[in-house]
Amino acid sequence: MLNLRDLRIDPASLGDKMLLVEVVPAYEYKDNKRTDKITGYRYVVCLVEHRLEKLAVRIDGPQLMESPDNFVEVLFSDLEVSGYEAQGKVQFTGKASGIVPVK
């Protein structure tokens, strides 16, 4: 049976402009419970070409950017986007290896 988590979304379909709005820690989970160990960060971006819908992109390791005071346009390295079902709705998530501000 096909699993929604196995499908990958072409990052190009997200549009040319992503605006970083927030950076939050990503924690390790053991036995379905969150621990205090930070394993990476989620970089929350607004997708300009999708009515500013938000997408959280996880990058494991140290924090690479701070939460901005205003919107900051960013680019991700090796961005992968997939979907999953939660509470009867399809949600989207991303993971990447890096993030840089657009200059």
Image (tube, rainbow, N blue to C red):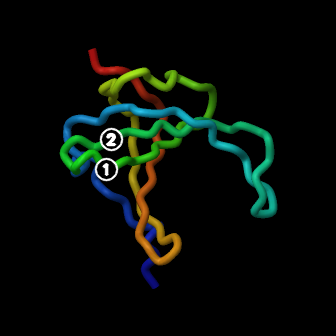
* Picture coordinates of residue 32, whole percent (x, y): 75, 63
Q: CA distance from mark 1 to mark 2?
A: 5 Å
Q: Residues within 10 Å of mark 1 (few under 14, many from 20)?
A: few
Image point (34%, 24%), residue name? 72
Q: Position of residue 56 (x, y in %)?
A: 46, 45
Q: Would you place residue 51 above or below residue 98 in this image?
A: below
Q: Quadrant of residue 62?
A: top right
Left or right of 51 on screen, residue 71 = right
Q: Is residue 81 above or below residue 20?
A: below
Kind of residue indicated by mark 1: Glu
Q: Quadrant of the C terminus?
A: top left
For the point 31% across and 50% down, the residue is: 53
Residue under numbered circle 2 = 46
- What number of labels is visible? 2
Figure check: 76 above or below 30: above
In the rendered image, the vertical position of residue 74 relative to residue 58, given as above or below? above
69, 41: nearer the viewer: 69
Secondary element type, mark 2: strand
Which numbered dot is residue 53? 1
The foreground one among 98 and 35 is 35
* Residue shown at 43% from the left, 72% from the top: 89
Element carrying mark 1: strand
Q: Residues within 10 Å of mark 2 (few under 14, many from 20)?
A: many
Q: Earlier in the sequence, mark 1 or mark 2?
A: 2
Kindly give the residue lying farthest to the bottom in the view shown: 1
The label on residue 11 is none
Q: Which residue is farthest front?
A: 69
Residue 8 lies, in percent from the top left, at: 37, 60
Residue 60 locus on image (x, y percent): 59, 37
